[in-house]
Image (cartoon, rainbow, N blue to C red):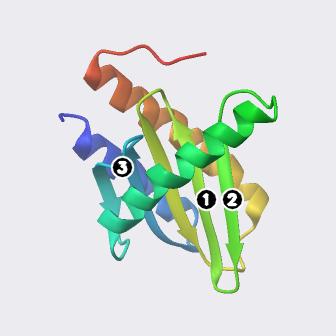
Amino acid sequence: MAAEADVLTELRRLRARLPQLTGALAATVDGLMLAQDATNEAESVAALTAAALGVAQRLADTTGRGTFHELLVRGDAGYVATYAAGSSAVLTLLAEPRINVGRLHLEARRAGARVGDLVDSSLGRQETP
């Protein structure tokens, strides 16, 4: 995919804006890696992201909450955050426990929109409203 280099550039810019990120990856909604920046076991994380995405989408739909936008998991050692990125991709971020979660959401939503535009345009798809 021609957009992979641009997606990697976006991930690196996001990590520069949020130094508390310990990893970032973009993957297709079915778990195929598009780009990753310093994420250990990125392929496994991409596959798990696809599984979590399926559950999150079903949960949002079943509870009448609409289309999936984001998922945040907090553990003892930090956060895993997944954001919709257009119609074909997701952005998953790993963060230290001391991150400002509001800023994480703000920056990640913007980056997710840019990644979504890059991926959807390279696939010739329109982003869903």
Left or right? Give the position of 19 relative to 105.
left
Q: Residues within 10 Å of mark 1 (few under 14, many from 20)?
A: many
From the image, which quarter does the C terminus lie in?
Answer: top right
Q: The disc labelled 1 sits on which kind of residue?
A: Ala
For mark 3, what is the residue? 31
Q: Residue at x 72, y 79 (%)?
A: 98
Q: Residue at x 18, y 34 (%)?
A: 2
Q: Residue 42 appears at what percent x and percent y? A: 34, 67
From this view, report whether residue 32 is shown above or below residue 24: above
How far is mark 2 from mark 3, CA to CA? 18 Å
From this view, report whether residue 106 is shown above or below residue 126: below
Q: The disc labelled 3 sits on which kind of residue?
A: Gly
- The reply to whether residue 69 is visible in this rendering is no
Q: Are marks 2 and 1 in contact (CB under 8 Å)?
A: yes
Left or right? Give the position of 62 relative to 54.
right
Image quadrant of residue 104? Answer: bottom right
From this view, report whether residue 79 is shown above or below residue 113: below
Q: Which sits earlier in the primary sequence, circle 2 or circle 3?
A: 3
Helix, strand or loop under label 1: strand
Helix, strand or loop under label 3: loop
Q: Tell me the number on the disc at residue 72.
A: 2
Q: Residues within 10 Å of mark 3 (few under 14, many from 20)?
A: many
From this view, report whether residue 3 is shown above or below residue 91: above
Q: Which sits earlier in the primary sequence, circle 1 or circle 3?
A: 3
Q: Tell me the number on the disc at residue 81.
A: 1
Q: Nearer the viewer, mark 2 or mark 3?
A: 3
